[in-house]
Structure formats: structure tokens, C-alpha cells
Image (cartoon, rainbow, N blue to C red):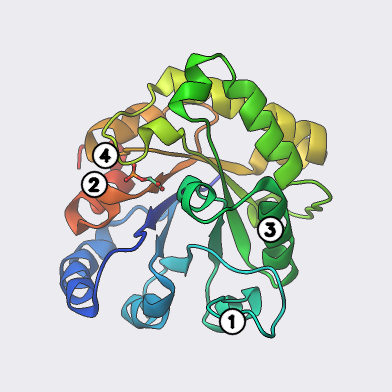
Amino acid sequence: MRELIAGNWKMNMTRKEIDSFFEEFLRMVPYLPNEREVAIIPPFVYIPYVSEKLKGTTINYGAQNLFYEEKGAFTGEVSAEMLKDLGCTYVIIGHSERRKYFCETDETVNRKIKAALGKGLTPIVCVGETLEERESGKTFEIIEGQIRKGLDGVELSEPERLVIAYEPVWAIGTGKTATPQQAEEVHAFIRKLLKEKFGEISKDIRILYGGSVKPENAAGLMEMENINGALVGGASLDPVSFYRIIRYDSGG
Ligand code: PGA
């Protein structure tokens, strides 16, 4: 399966900063390994700007959210069709920051996944437990609920059309990464849930790890059987560290 390394820029970057990112990053692009897929996920407003920069490369791009309604009086929102219109391949859905600050629930996640798939976008669906949940032994219960409710009624014809990202909330932006074993335990559990739901094709659904992925820890994580890529936040803002994560197996 082709691994995916996606850079989630969150609410960062200006055009000037994007210019300097690509000035450096595009120089390294010819050295990116073909067998690995790369995507950049900027804030909505910069999607066209980033897509221009990526012309002539094989790097994909996407958005950090969408709204599930087709169109109409939903001030401030962006639809799946609009993202498709801009050439997006991916859309992140249910990131823990959206769950925490913007009232995202498993129900809205579910509707957004369906909206994305309906317009031919590939959702990157984020799940993960908080520190408190982990410490009280609820990790698997939380993940199971998020996966089952999030994917309720979702149909999938090809495994490439869905990506799951396991992002333990306590590891996001904290510098604390899950150990490869801790992550693999949850990834294997997610794989089992996907198998129950989608059957055989589930073995080819990519499950990314996210949460303080850095050039130094990427190789150890990617080595695990059920870790099929990374969703990178902070480290994707720096072209050199993002590049080094993409080339995690070549010593940078
Ligand atoms: P981080 O963020 O790499 O900065 O921890 C990951 C994410 O939230 O997608």
C-alpha cells in the first residue's frame, strides 16, 4: 500500500511564508521517493495559492474541514463541491482541535464524511483519546465509538477513498509522541474495526499516525505493520523537517 505523508498546516502561514516554504521545498521535490504519496493541507484561503505552487509536481493537496450541506445560507462555511472545484484530493474531518473548539461531534463527522465521499473527496478521518481517557483505561472504547459512529452508514468501494488518522490528543503539539508500540496497538485495533465494517478491502485502507511526528521519530513509527503514513502538524511548516519525514527511511 502506498504510504501517505500529509502536512496539516492548521491556522498557519501567509502568502509570504508560503513563498519561502516552497522556494526551499520545491528544490527537494525531485528527491522525494515515488512510492510515497505526499499531500499539503493549508488553510482554506490558501488552497488556490498552494495548488499553483504544486503545479507540475505529483503532490496532492486538501482542506482541513468542510460543511456537510450542499449549498445555501450557511455563512462562513465551505462545501465539499467547492473543495472539489479547487482540485482538492483530501479533506481532514473530525480533527481533535475541531472536536474541542468547534463542537465537532461523531454525528457531524459522519455527515461530513458522507458529504466528502459524495463529491469524490477522500476524507482523512481523525480519531484519538485524551490523556484522561487513556489514563482511565478508556482508549479502545473511545476509538471504537469514534470509528463506529463516524463511519455509520458509510459505504466504500475502494480502500483508497478513505484514510483514518489516529491522533492521540495528548501527543498533538506537545512533543510527546506515542511510542511505536502504543500507536501500533491502536492502529491494529482500528484495522480490526474496519475489517468488521468493510470486509477484505480494509487491509488496504491507510491508517496514519499523527501527534508530534518529527524527522527523529518517523522511521520508528512507520516501521509498524499497521501504520501507513503520517499526519504531520508543526513539523510540516518547515520544508526541511517535512522533507526529512517524507524520506524517513533514508536518514534524511
Ligand atoms: P503535531 O500535529 O504534529 O503538531 O503534533 C498533528 C496534527 O494535529 O495533525
Name the secondary structure under disc 3: helix
Name the secondary structure under disc 4: loop
Mark number displayed over residue 113: 3
Q: Identify the amino acid type marked 3.
A: Ile
**101 and 149: which one is in front?**
101
Mark number displayed over residue 214: 4
- Vertical position of residue 43 compared to residue 208: above or below: below
Cβ of disc 4 within 8 Å of ligand 1?
yes
- Vertical position of residue 182 compared to residue 117: above or below: above
Tags 3 and 4 touching, CB below 8 Å: no
Question: Disc 4 or 2, which lies upstream in sequence?
Answer: 4
Q: CA distance from mark 3 to mark 4?
A: 28 Å
Q: What quarter of the picture does the N terminus occupy?
A: top right
Structural crowding at the residue carrying mark 4, measured as other residues with C-alpha within 10 Å and reported as few (<14), some (14–19) or many (≥20):
many
Q: Residue at x 74, y 46 (%)?
A: 151
- Residue annotated with mark 1: 82
**63 and 195: which one is in front?**
63
Question: For residue 238, what is the image quadrant?
Answer: bottom left
Q: CA distance from mark 4 to mark 2?
A: 8 Å
Q: CA distance from mark 1 to mark 4?
A: 32 Å
- Residue annotated with mark 2: 244
Question: For residue 226, what is the image quadrant?
Answer: top right
Q: Identify the amino acid type marked 2.
A: Arg
Front position among marks 2 and 1: 1
